Amino acid sequence: MSEDKVIVANRGLVRADFNFWVGRYLDKFYDNLENKKVIGNKCTKCGAVFVPPRKVCGECNVVIPLEENWVDLPDTGTVVNYTITPYRINDRTLRKAKNLLLGMVQIDGSNTSIVYRLLDLEPSEVKIGMKVKIDWAEKPKGDPSDIKGFVKV
Amino acid sequence: MGRQVAIVSAGFSEHASKRSDVNMAELVSEAVSDCLKNAPGVDFNDIDAYVNGNMPAFEGVNLPELWMTDWMGARNKPLLRVTTGGTTGGTVAISGYYTVAAGLPKIDTVLAVAFEQQSQGDTSVGLGSVAYGEISVLNTMGIPYDQLSRLLSAGAAIGVAAYQATNYMSKTHITEEDLARVVVQNRHNAAKTWWSHLKMPDITVEEVLDTPYISYPLRYGMVCPASDGACAMLFTIEEKAKDMCDIPVYVNGVASVANESAVLGYDGSGTGQIDPSEQLGAMKSSELAYYQAGISFPRKEIDYAEVYSPFPNQELMWVEKLGLFEETTAPKMYETGVTSLKGELPINCSGGVNSTNAIGASAMERPAEAALQIMGKADNQVPKTVHTSIGHGWGGSLNLCTLMVMSDEPQRKWRR
Ligand SMILES: [Zn+2]
């Protein structure tokens, strides 16, 4: 067999960094998380409450003004869906990791759900419909990590 | 046999280098709201289907069209995403046209939306995959992608445009002053267009020539900015158009033609193999679209043009290659005011891509502005009546062009 001589090699992946603007609606949401407060906003037509807040209600095609219709919400909610996974997206070789519980939680008083980890729960304990509350970060920074996850009420 | 299609409205978001006050979906919703505001007889219930697009790899997320569905009013409606590089906006508009022309039951009115929020990502990396005109030359030498940027003095689209400019200048014997004059006209026009990015009402030729080179013969003061922005156009059938707006703009010809494949090039195209100012794509697309529209003498029959020119040499080249002026005569037309707002054939009164470039939206903003000029609703409206106008887009490595020919009269001849 002849020896391969490498003339041209592609030495690595081309990196492309993206930083997304979240916009003013989410700015306000994250500012409130920093104070351990959950806020949503309400469609001016159908009254649906969105967490996180959004500019447009897609059901009604109505723009919710930035200045109005904000709703203060509690840090409690209901598990509307869940899964249990040993899979780590950043470490695919780790096949026998501890199970994580991921839940879709509807904050009380809202019509939408957010996805976070369910903490301090055994897989056998989790049920659709169970009441949970936010486990806040000790030092909130005004970003999604301010909510560590949800714990049983 | 296709149906006669009309444009009833067009809208824009505000454009700037950083629209950090909005996310991608909110940016798009601004253009959609503006488009509907310009057509008071239309609401979301009247829209049957959507086409959406931006420059591939510039959005940094998968399926952006699904993210922004609600923000476009597209919930539970047919939605198609189309991306064709620099010409994306033109292709999205053409796809809006196709969707209406097809004559499918329950699909009469289509909203086409194109956008880019360039401040979020790395534009040079995105463009690296498509816009190095030299890529075919480098590939034939076996030089890999990750070394491209080290070998080229200027990357991205200007890497193509500089060679294009050198060719054009040597053919026409023009000076840098001729290039600067195009820029000045664009910047002044942009100052009178509410949604434009680089508004410079007082800039002079001397000031443009006083800026340093990026890549000879192009100087910093001559090139387009990178913008955040969005554009929307509303297409419908002839029968409904009259109820939706005062002056429907009929789409009478569309074409998208390239004598290359997107990257490697047909017939060895690419800056190193051919004259980049030859532009067979522009000639072929205009030949086809003018034929469809029944236009035999573009110079006489077209009253207004928006051409896709991030760089001033391209503007001179396009207006010639699209048949608006004789070869090598365009610089004279800018010097004598023929292409100005009050001239015989005004070009890019919006300020053009040279003044505002949210890439995915740019090739839609051309037909959008050209349609508004026919309606008499453009911000920087030309004083004469515009009956027929064209909106052009450019992309690919070198030679991909989109074209839309619009008129205040429907044109059925080609459908016989
Ligand atoms: Zn609603």
Image (cartoon, rainbow, N blue to C red):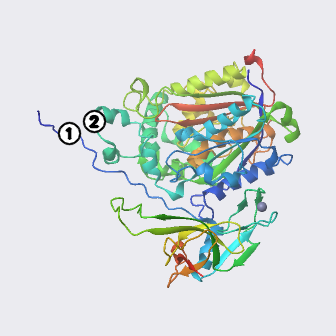
**Which quarter of the rendered picture does the N terminus of chain B lie within?**
top right
In which quadrant of the rendered view does residue B185 lie? Answer: top right
Dot 2: few (<14), some (14–19), or many (≥20) neighbours within 10 Å?
A: few
Farthest bottom residue in view: A138
In which quadrant of the rendered view does residue B377 lie? Answer: top right
**Which quarter of the rendered picture does the C terminus of chain B lie within?**
top right
Visible in this render: residue B192? Answer: no
Q: Chain of mark 2?
A: B
> What number is the disc on residue A7?
1
Question: In this view of the protein, which residue sits in the foreground, B158 or B199?
Answer: B158
Image position, residue B405 (x, y; %): 70, 29
Secondary structure under the numbered disc 2 in the rendered image:
loop
B28 to the left or right of B168: right
Visible in this render: residue A87? Answer: yes
Discs 2, 1: same chain: no
Question: In this view of the protein, which residue sits in the foreground, B26 or A93?
Answer: A93
Image position, residue B149 (x, y; %): 35, 47
Image position, residue B42 (x, y; %): 83, 46
Amino acid type, residue under disc 2 in the picture: Gly
Whole-Å distance between the Cαs marked 2 and 1?
Answer: 8 Å
Amino acid type, residue under disc 1 in the picture: Ile
| Residue under the point 58% across and 50% down | B358
| Residue under the point 57% across and 38% down | B87
Q: Chain of mark 1?
A: A
Q: Is residue B177 above or below residue A41?
A: above
In which quadrant of the rendered view does residue B140 lie? Answer: top left
Q: Tell which quarter ligand 1 is in.
A: bottom right
Dot 1: few (<14), some (14–19), or many (≥20) neighbours within 10 Å?
A: few
Residue at numbered disc 2: B142
Q: Is residue B196 above or below residue B375?
A: below
The reply to whether dot 2 and dot 1 touch (C-beta < 8 Å) is yes
